[in-house]
Image (tube, rainbow, N blue to C red):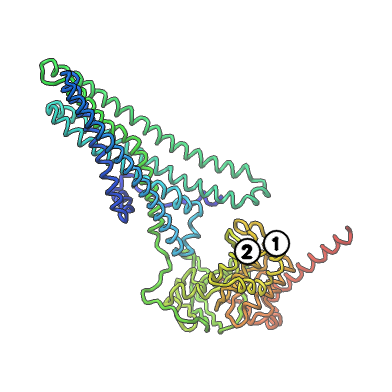
């Protein structure tokens, strides 16, 4: 569960106004919709206050004076206001819901698009679960704050403002006394806010680790079952969930404590108003309707403050989520195109590595002053011990990484002067662990060239040696491959991956130990497909089974980031050096394995 060890950026614990502003900016493309729902919620708050004032008039001018005509007039006005209120409520709910969905869509689309532009190094150091959490749950919380959170804030501010105006209209002295409560409530809210924000940041951070652990454990379930390490993984996962529970518990406890503290302060304010209002009534300065309306307006003013507990909890979660989502959006690709980058019509030509030095960690070079000249159409095989630099050479060629020092030229161009599309669009790759997308066999092959016809898909499958096994599937080319190709064998996935590369019609072809996990028969099929796709193309093969590279134009033995030996198969065998030892050792192991199998068959 290596994902658990990932440590993301630590964010500051104080309130970040810039983050809030950036959250609100997500609604700017829909400013008319935003303005519409803010106006609607403001009208709802205004009419709530009008209802209260109308009730005061009904009590004082109609009921206490027994004025039937005034009562009917006020009830008519009340009915009209109720109809308008229904319209405003429908409007703000509809607009808020629509705005929220559009913001969710935009955020997820923006993050997904940005992920496509990030360099391989970002995915090397960032767990999948962390990324998934940003794109899903964090974007959800941001949208909630922009819509329902902003709605609650607008409603609260409007309610307070309108209530204060009406209280001053009724009795300005009592209104001034009530306003002394507000600073006390603000101080309490600020203190609680700081603590709640810190806890919710911690909750979101641990949640990223939990999502990552989920993803890794599900992806590695076969290994877990095979090694019976369920208890170990469960123990590690329980440690994470308990840590998150404690942080969430503290946040919930603070939120729960905040509300009764606010209510207690509010209760003292209401009690003081009733006491003072009763005194004012006894001397004839206030009516029953005035006192009733005043108490209602105090509730209008203090209720939004009481609701700050819930609003703050939502706001802090959204801010914590936004900080992480924006950290993904702000991630800068290490490999960027120059403004003057070009896309030539073809990259068929020589490939040169000139004094290339590269390291993943500073001070630990993988390649050191590496030089290589590959002629157009040449097939180069890379062999050698694990960690020697074979995959790094190919990754640099594909510009998944760039040299720390030195230059790589393709067809005479310094490849940093080319667009990424110019390079990646001319590449065909078959990896050691092929990845298939959920869908059909036909769709996965066509992924190599989306405009290809069905006949071209079938022709590519035939060249790759995949056509025969595809026809044995229940629905042929329309058979579902399952998530990640889980319904197919490794060899079948490899053949489909090879067909996809053939269909792409690449100018540069890369095979990364594509036959290391398949049986001898499938290896022969892949070998035939490789010869079909490599014909006339510059090709690089990283080989585990040396028998697959005998026909390579040149074989490079890579050790410690340098070329230890170079030549074709026959030349290197005659030299009796590194390659000879690797080849004879592997040949001996394969012969012994074949002997053991034949002996077992005879005894059976």
Picture coordinates of residue 454, whole percent (x, y):
60, 71
Which residue: 52% across, 79% down?
A: 371
| In this rendering, position of residue 8 left or right of residue 594 | left
Q: Using the rendered image of the protein, determine whether residue 558 is visible from the camera's viewpoint.
A: no
Splitting the image into 4 quarters, where does residue 311 fall?
A: top left
Helix, strand or loop at mark 2: helix
Which residue: 30% across, 27% down?
263
Q: Position of residue 10 (x, y in %)?
A: 39, 49
**Residue under numbered circle 2:** 441
- Measured as percent of width and height from the top left, residue 309 is found at 33, 35
Ranked by sequence position, the earlier of labels 1 and 2 is: 2
User: Which circle marks residue 175 in the picture?
Assistant: none
In the image, residue 338 sits, relative to residue 35, either above or below, namely below
Q: Nearer the viewer, residue 249 or 439?
A: 439
How crowded pointer 2 is (Cα within 10 Å; few <14, some 14-19, many 20+) is rated as: many
Seen in the picture, residue 266 relative to 322 is either above or below; the reply is above
Circles 1 and 2: CB atoms closer than 8 Å: yes
Where does label 1 land, which residue?
Answer: 473
How far from the left and from the top, in percent, is residue 257?
A: 35, 29
Residue at left offset 64%, top offset 68%: 514
Return the residue nearer the eye: 550 or 88: 88
Q: Can you say whether 534 is above or below 444 in the image?
A: below
Q: Classify mark 1: helix, strand or loop.
A: loop
Could you tell me which residue is drawn at 29 percent across and 51 percent down?
21
Q: Residues within 10 Å of mark 1 (few under 14, many from 20)?
A: some
**Residue 442 falls in which quadrant of the image?**
bottom right
């Amino acid at each position: 569960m290596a994902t658990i060890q990932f440590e993301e950026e630590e964010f500051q614990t104080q309130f970040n106004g810039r983050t809030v502003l950036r959250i609100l900016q997500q609604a700017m493309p829909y400013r008319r919709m935003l303005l519409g729902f803010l106006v609607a919620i403001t009208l709802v708050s205004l009419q709530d206050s009008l209802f209260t004032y109308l009730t005061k008039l009904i009590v004082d001018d109609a009921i206490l004076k027994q004025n039937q005509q005034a009562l009917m007039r006020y009830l008519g006005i009340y009915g009209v206001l109720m109809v308008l209120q229904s319209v405003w409520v429908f409007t703000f709910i509809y607009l808020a819901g629509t705005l929220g969905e559009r913001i969710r869509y935009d955020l997820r689309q923006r993050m997904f698009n940005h992920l496509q532009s990030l360099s391989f190094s970002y995915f090397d150091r960032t767990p999948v679960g962390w990324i998934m959490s940003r794109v899903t749950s964090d974007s959800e919380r941001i949208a909630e704050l922009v819509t329902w959170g902003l709605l609650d804030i607008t409603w609260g501010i409007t309610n307070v403002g309108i209530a204060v105006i009406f209280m001053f209209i009724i009795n300005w002295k009592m209104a001034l006394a009530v306003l002394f409560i507000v600073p006390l409530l603000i101080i309490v809210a600020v203190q609680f806010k700081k603590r709640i924000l810190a806890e919710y940041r911690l909750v979101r951070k641990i949640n990223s680790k939990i999502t990552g652990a989920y993803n890794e454990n599900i992806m590695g379930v076969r290994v877990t079952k095979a090694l019976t390490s369920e208890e170990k993984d469960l123990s590690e996962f329980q440690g994470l969930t308990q840590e998150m529970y404690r942080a969430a518990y503290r946040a919930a406890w603070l939120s729960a404590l905040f509300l009764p503290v606010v209510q207690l302060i509010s209760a003292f304010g209401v009690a003081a108003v009733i006491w003072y209002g009763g005194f004012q009534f006894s001397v004839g300065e206030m009516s029953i309707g005035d006192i009733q309306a005043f108490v209602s307006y105090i509730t209008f003013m203090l209720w939004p403050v009481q609701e700050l507990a819930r609003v703050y909890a939502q706001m802090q979660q959204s801010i914590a989520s936004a900080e992480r989502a924006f950290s993904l959006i702000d991630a800068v690709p290490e490999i960027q195109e120059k403004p003057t980058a070009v896309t030539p019509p073809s990259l068929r030509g020589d490939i040169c590595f000139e004094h290339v030095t590269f390291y993943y960690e500073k001070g630990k070079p993988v390649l050191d002053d590496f030089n290589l000249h590959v002629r157009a159409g040449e097939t180069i095989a890379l062999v050698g011990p694990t960690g020697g630099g074979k995959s790094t050479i190919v990754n640099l060629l594909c510009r998944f990484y760039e040299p720390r020092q030195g230059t790589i030229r393709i067809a005479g161009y310094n490849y940093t002067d080319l667009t990424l599309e110019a390079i990646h669009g001319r590449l065909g790759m078959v990896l050691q662990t092929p990845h298939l997308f959920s869908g059909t066999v036909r769709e996965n092959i066509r992924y190599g060239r989306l405009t290809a016809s069905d006949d071209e898909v079938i022709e590519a499958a035939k060249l790759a040696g995949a056509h025969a096994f595809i026809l044995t599937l229940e629905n042929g080319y329309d058979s579902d491959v399952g998530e990640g190709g889980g319904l197919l064998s490794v060899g079948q996935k490899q053949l489909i991956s090879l067909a996809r590369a053939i269909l792409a019609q690449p100018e540069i072809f890369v095979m990364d130990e594509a036959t290391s996990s398949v049986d001898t028969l499938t290896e022969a099929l892949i070998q035939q497909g490789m010869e079909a796709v490599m014909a006339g193309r510059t090709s690089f093969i990283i080989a585990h089974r040396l028998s697959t590279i005998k026909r390579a134009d040149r074989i490079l033995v890579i050790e410690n980031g340098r070329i230890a030996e170079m030549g074709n198969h026959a030349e290197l065998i005659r030299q009796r050096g590194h390659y000879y030892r690797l080849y004879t050792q592997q040949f001996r192991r394969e012969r012994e394995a074949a002997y053991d199998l034949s002996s077992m068959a005879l005894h059976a």
